[in-house]
Image (spheres, helix red, strand yellow):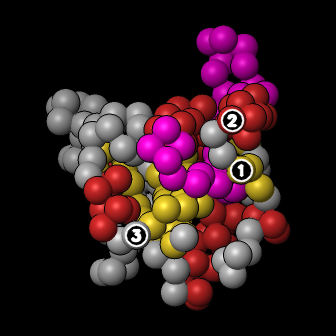
Amino acid sequence: MRKALLIIDMQHFVVERIERGVQSYPENCIENMKRVLEQFRQAGQPIVHVRHQSAEQGSLFHESSPSSVPLASFQALAEEPVFLKSTSSAFSSTELFSYLQKARISELVVIGAVAGFCINSSVRAGADLGLKMTVVKDAVISFELGQYELGAAQIHNVTLALLDADFASVIACSELHLND
C-alpha cells in the first residue's frame, strides 16, 4: 500500500479570509500543514496538489484572480503533480483517481482547505473509490459560517467527527508516521 499526501486548495483565498477577520480553526493549522508537507518531502513520499479553478469570469477561483494563486509555502515542486478541479471533490472533475491508480497509491493523507467543503467532499469520494483516507485534523482549516451562526471550531469538529465515523481515520499531526 503506497501512501501519498493530498494537499487541497491551499490558495490565497485562505489567508485573505483570515486577514479579513473571518474566524478560522484551528489557529495553527497552516503551520501544521507546512510541517506535514516537509515531513513528506523529507521522507521522499509522493505529494499531490489539488487546486480549485473556475472558468467563470470574476470568480474568486478564476485563473486570473489573485485569490486562486497557490500560497508560496504550498507551491508544487517539479515532481509533484497538480490537478485543477472545478468541483468540490478533488475526484469528480479531475484525473486524480486515474493518476493514483497508475502510481499504485492506495492511501491518501489529506491536509488543506476547507474542512466542511472540499476536504469533506474529497475524503468521502476517495473512500467511496476504495482509497484509505486519513485526515490530519490540525492540518485542515475551517471557517465560520456567520450567516448560520456556526463557529469555525464547531464546523470543524462536526465535519471531522462525521468523516472519522465512516470515511477516514482522523489523526493529529503528532500521530502521523510515514513508516507505517
How far apart in space, not on screen, are marks 3 and 2 (Cα)?
23 Å
- On screen, residue 51 versus residue 7, left or right, reads left
**Would residue 136 be counted in the magenta stretch?**
yes
Indicate the quadrant containing the N terminus: top left, top right, bottom left or bottom right.
bottom right
Residue at which label 2 appears: 166
Q: Secondary structure at mark 3?
A: loop
Question: Which label belongs to residue 135?
Answer: none
The reply to whether residue 7 is in sight is yes
Badge 3, how many Cα within 10 Å: few under 14, some, many 20+? few
Residue plotted at (82% across, 68% down) = 174
Magenta highlight range = 127-155
Give, as a three-letter code, the residue at label 3. Answer: Arg
The location of residue 131, given as percent across then percent down, is: 51, 52
Residue at which label 3 appears: 104
How far apart in space, not on screen, are marks 1 and 2 (Cα)?
9 Å
Number of numbered discs = 3
